[in-house]
Amino acid sequence: MKKIVFVFLGILISAFASAQTNKVQPDTVMREITMQSVEVIPSAGHVKGMLLMDLDIQYELEGAVDNMYNFKYALAEKQFKSLRRRYPDHPLPYFLMGLSQWWKIVPTNIQTRQYDDLFFAYMDSTIQKAEKMYDRDEKNFEAAFFLAAANGFTARLHSERSNWRKATVASKRSLEFLEKAKAGNGLSPEFLFGEALFNYYSVWIHENYKMLRPVLAFFPNGDKRLGIKQLRYVANTGFYTGTEAKFFLMKIYANEEGNMEAALELAHDLATKYPNNAYFQRFYARALFVQGHFTLAERVSLDILNKLDQQMPGYEAVSGRYASYILAYINQNKYRDLQKAKSYYQNSIMFAEMSNERDSGYFVNSYLNLARIAKQEKDIKMAKHYYAVVLESSEKKAAAHKEAKTFLKAHKKN
């Protein structure tokens, strides 16, 4: 969530700087981003011919969209390209191709840069096609939707890559067109997705980052509860944005709201519908683990490692780290099989190093539990080695750091 905060921070700072430079009043700084309720219902002329709401297109693409989220990228992209051949001037097929690249990046915790160029190229094409539609008709809220969505995804990846200027520009454009796309809220849940995210995160940032509150005055008020309600609605009814809404809801419940039961329910739905999606599978395994459903967590984790061994798309070191740690903990504390536990903890450490995530909790806790096992086996030399890594890798105020410091101090002469 820090990346989302940085994107918003970029927007807010940019807006604030603009206000100071032009010496305008706060209520006119973001005149185009008002998030007011829509009272004008779009005419039939504006709705006719919109691919986003074409039920025949949705029926045709249902399998392709499912294939994309199930990491069967080649099959999905074949259908997306077929749509592009028939509608070369519409942003929809380009956006779907870009979204497919995005879901190749997600399983690596956004670390891989292998698909960046293609992702940005498809999102740029989406923006270009949508801009032409919008230039012909400024009341075309389908064009506004794609401009908001493509700029939003572009901003997200730029923020992950620390390209703050580009992230800020894309974010501001996304918010500007998000307001214009609201005209379609009453016609399709697809249009509601962006507003739902804004409603939730604008308030969440206000609650968790006090330093931003003065700058938030330049932006429209959000409504966190409404944002969650809107995301639920989109999750249940959206065709193109339904899975994205579930993805965000799942993370919001787990990380921001502390509602692991709700997160587990969503994770179960996503992991069941998309059994080859490494991100959904590992999130489901973690949710089961945290809730104490060890038998199911073990089963899912073993499946993850099996798919990783088969080199299935999306199953990489990050998923291996999650699954190995869960299996190590279960073998240590449920089965009391310390040899298996040690092996899995070592694997979790190996995967953390492979994904350059030595600062993760799984990395530190793997060494911590190896130290405890070594201490239990009265292997003081190995315990000291493991505790030394814990001491180096953990924060000073952390319980693990204190435990390591105490043990090492007590065994200086050993």
Image (spheres, rainbow, N blue to C red):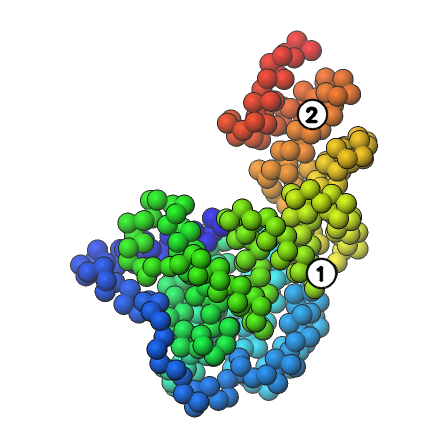
The answer, for residue 110, to whether it is visible in the render is: no
Q: Residues within 10 Å of mark 1 (few under 14, many from 20)?
A: some
Judged left or right of residue 262, residue 315 is right
Name the residue carrying label 1. Answer: 272
Mark in front: 1 vs 2: 1
Q: In this view, does 365 lie above or below 354?
A: above
Quadrant of residue 182 within the rendered picture: bottom left
Identify the residue shown where x is 47% and y is 73%: 191
Judged left or right of residue 259, residue 273 is right
Q: How crowded is mark 2: few (under 14 residues within 10 Å), some or many (20 or more)?
A: many
| Most distant residue in the left direction | 23
Q: Position of residue 292 (x, y in %)?
A: 69, 42
Q: Where is residue 66 in the image (x, y as percent from the top left)?
A: 67, 70
Identify the residue shown where x is 70% and y is 64%: 273
Q: In this view, does 345 lie above or below 207?
A: above
Judged left or right of residue 169, residue 268 is right
User: Quadrant of the image for the C terminus?
Assistant: top right
Q: Distance between the residues labelled 1 and 2?
A: 36 Å
Dots 1, 2 in contact, CB < 8 A: no
Name the residue carrying label 2. Answer: 371
Identify the residue shown where x is 60% and y is 57%: 106
| Most distant residue in the top direction | 413
Q: Position of residue 80 (x, y in %)?
A: 63, 77
Judged left or right of residue 12, residue 234 is right
Q: Which mark is residue 231?
A: none
Mark closest to the chain's N terminus, 1 or 2: 1
> Could you tell me the amino acid type at mark 2?
Ala
Q: Which of 256 and 21 is in front in this view?
A: 256
> Could you tell me the amino acid type at mark 1?
Thr
